[in-house]
Each structure stands twice: as C-alpha cells, then as structure tokens.
Amino acid sequence: MRKPLELPEPLGTAPFTLTKAWELGVHHERLRRKDLVMPTRGVREPVTGEMDRISRFRPLLEVTHGIASHTSACHLLGLPVPGFLSDSTHISVPKGRDAPHRPGIQGHALTLFPGEVISLDGMWVTSPARTFLDMAALLPEIHLVALGDAIASLGRRPWSRQDVPAVPPDELRKYLDWKRGTPGIRKARLAAQLVRSGVDSPPESFLRLAFIDAHLPEFTPDCPVIDGFGTIRHHVDLGNEHHRIAVEHDGEHHRTREQQRIDARRNALMQELGWRQVIIVADDLKNDCASAVSKVRRMLRSAA
C-alpha cells in the first residue's frame, strides 16, 4: 500500500476541520486514509503524535459554532480542573440555538450577557466569572472556592496566563449578585464569600478552608513579612501577622537542590524576623488536611 501523501502544515500535527483541509486543497479521498481518525463529524485528527487537550478544542468549536464553557473554559483559561470530573468537552451556544449533541461533547444552551464571553487565541470562551458560575453545578464547594481563588489570582505567577485579567473577589461577588435563576447560583454565592486573591495552588485553598473549618485564626494568602523598617522582605503562602506564624506548602519542586537552597535562605530570614514556620507537605493534606490543622494548632499554642 502506498504511503499517504503528506498533509500540509499544520494539518499533520493537530486536529483540523474538513473545511480547513478543503481550503488547503486536500482531496476528500486523502481524508479517508487510516492515518486520520474522526473524533466527530467534520473533524479529522492524525493518529500519530501527542495531541494536547487545547489543540483539540479549536476544530470542535469551529464545527459546532460554539463557546468553550465549564471545564473546557477552565483548561483554556489556565484554571485548575479536579481529576474526578469527566473528560468531556463542554461546548455552549446562546439560548435559542440547539445545544450540540455529539460523542464526547456535553452541550449547553446558555443565556449569555455582554462580557460573559471573551475571545482567547481565536476561540470563544466563557469569561472567568461566568465559568465560575457554570462550574458551581459541577463542583463541591471546597473545589469551587479553589477555582475562585485561581480566578482571583490569574496572572500572578509567570506560569499562569498573563492575557486574562484576574477577577478580584469583590468583583466576583458583585457579578453573582445580579445573576438570577442560573443552576448553582446559591452555591456560587456562598463559595464566593470565601474566595481570596494571592493564592498559588488548590492545596493552599484547601489548607485555608481547613483552618476556617477548625476555627483557627484566619491565615492570609500571600501574606507579607515586614521587617522593623517597614520593608517587605518576603511573602508566605499563608500567614497570620498577629501570631507571626507562616504556613508554607512545599510541593514536589521543593525537593530540588536549588529550591532547597532557596528554602534554607527563607528559613533563616523568617527566624531573623521572628516568624515561626509550619511546613506542609503532601501527606499533611490527606484526610481533609487533618495533619496540617494539628501542626498549626500546636504552633498557635506554643506561640500564645
């Protein structure tokens, strides 16, 4: 059997619509060869190579004339998606149109207002605030708060998207105040009361919420550590300035030698400035952060 003709770029490395292929002069017989699969009608995908999730969204949105929403919007916006949610692609259309019904796609017909849809990399996506509201129907409250924390902290770190503005917690709450009748609105409003900015990851959100549930003093995300001259010397993941206690969540990257050198300098600085530290690792997050809560409670007692 003859080797199939090479596809023009970028069709050979990413999913594409039939319309795009025809525009580039690809014959319909070439599109039936076994080196291409059909994830849904009107779309082809090369069987070789690794396809990232985001590259799969574009042709699906094109053939459905839809808007990425729910978990799909989260992926495009660079927001966390818990692993327990289904891997379906969520595509929405404005109310009055038929929601798309295709294998692997969860379709929605939404009442959308100006500002609730944005253009991102040439794709239509629900705005961060609207995505928070839609996700309220899918997430338990603790994960919804973590999503809100991420929305309020967009662009905060170099690895997050810099072209999507953060939504401060008070703006998110104001947005939800005027929404009526949307599934999950009550849960969204309750969760929004707990959203804070300055959070780097969902584990930090889970820790903060566990401290609230345990009736511990409030710990502020990205808490500044100030020396005697009023200069900010450091920011801690979670801090209580009154008790001068810092909670640092040390993830996997803290095992590298370079990060350990940075952490050693951090530890020396905190000791110099009179702050006590509680270092939290992965095991401390198990069982609703029970170990982390115990560590912080002991530190508070010793500081009293």
Image (tube, rainbow, N blue to C red):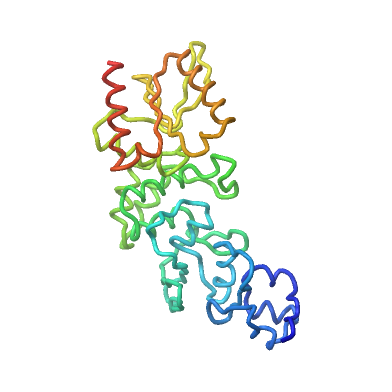
Q: Residue at x 33, y 60 (%)?
A: 137
Q: Is residue 32 left or right of residue 65?
A: right
| Residue at far front of view | 1
Q: Is residue 5 left or right of residue 270?
A: right
Closest to the observer, 16 or 64: 16
Q: Quadrant of residue 211?
A: top left
Q: Position of residue 55 (x, y in %)?
A: 60, 64
Q: Quadrant of residue 297?
A: top left
Q: Residue at x 50, y 15 (%)?
A: 230
Q: Quadrant of the N terminus?
A: bottom right
Q: Position of residue 189 (x, y in %)?
A: 32, 50
Residue 64 vertical placement versus 257 (above, below): below
Q: How many marks?
A: 0
Closest to the observer, 19 or 117: 19
Q: Residue at x 44, y 57 (%)?
A: 131
Q: Position of residue 267 (x, y in %)?
A: 48, 21
| Residue at far top of view | 228
Q: Position of residue 222 (x, y in %)?
A: 46, 31
Q: Residue at x 47, y 69 (%)?
A: 91
Closest to the observer, 169 or 227: 227
Residue 123 vertical placement versus 157 (above, below): below
Q: Quadrant of the C terminus?
A: top left
Residue 49 vertical placement versus 6 (above, below): above
